[in-house]
Amino acid sequence: MKRPEKIEDSKLFKSTTDSLAEVREFVNERAAAFGFGDREVSEITLAIDEACTNVIKHAYKGNPDTEFEVRVLASGTEFQVVVRDWGTGFNPEEVPVPDLKDKIKKHKAGGLGIFLMRKLMDTVEYQGRDASNEVRLIRYLRNEQKS
């Protein structure tokens, strides 16, 4: 199957953890179609899952009566996913790098979302606007993707 030269697609999702499976499927299908192998698709999908979970938990504080948008923009070798919400903003630079040894030692869950996004993607950018927030996650397609 020939890889599409360009992908532009977006979808609104309800701000509930039940929507995360649908978000994963939406991103997974487009990343695979763009030419990423299984491992890369899984990494991209996990990063987007973390971004959306942050929106649900923090921007909307668990309010299920809200929505967020996931937009895929891909061309050339750049696969970009933008997660947009209209909730409470934040500054990701103020989030400290987690102490993984301490988390493991104390069996603490959570707090790894931004860390994981940055490890799994080539670029992670955050932009707060007047009425919305956007997290832009970018992964580049390498010459040879392996499954």
Image (spheres, rainbow, N blue to C red):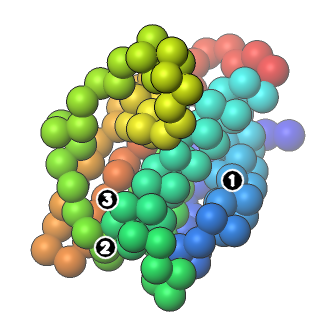
| Residue 3, above or below 142 | below
- Work out how far the residue at label 2 is from the one at label 1, CA to CA, in angstroms: 21 Å
- Work out how far the residue at label 2 is from the one at label 3, CA to CA, in angstroms: 10 Å
Q: Tag 2: residue type? A: Gly
| Residue 93, above or below 100 | below
Residue in the image at 20% along x and 77% along y: 131
Which residue was labeled with disc 1?
24
Q: Which of the two marks, 2 or 3, is nearer to us in this view?
A: 2
Q: Tag 1: residue type? A: Arg
Q: Position of residue 83 (x, y in %)?
A: 43, 59
Which residue was labeled with disc 2?
87
Q: Tag 3: residue type? A: Glu
Helix, strand or loop at label 3? It is: strand
Helix, strand or loop at label 2? It is: loop
Q: Is residue 84 left or right of residue 53?
A: left
Which residue was labeled with disc 3?
134
| Residue 76, above or below 9 | above
- Please tell me which of labels 2 and 1 falls first in the chain: 1
Q: Residue furthest front?
A: 106
Figure quadrant of residue 85: bottom left
* Callout 3 crowding tier (Cα within 10 Å): few <14, some 14–19, many ≥20: many
Where does the C terminus fall, quadrant-wise? top right
Q: Is residue 80 or residue 42 the one in the foreground?
A: 42
Q: Position of residue 113 (x, y in %)?
A: 45, 39
Residue in the image at 42% along x and 17% along y: 102
In the picture, the disc for residue 14 is none
* Callout 2 crowding tier (Cα within 10 Å): few <14, some 14–19, many ≥20: some
- Please tell me which of labels 1 and 3 falls first in the chain: 1
Residue in the image at 49% along x and 23% along y: 106
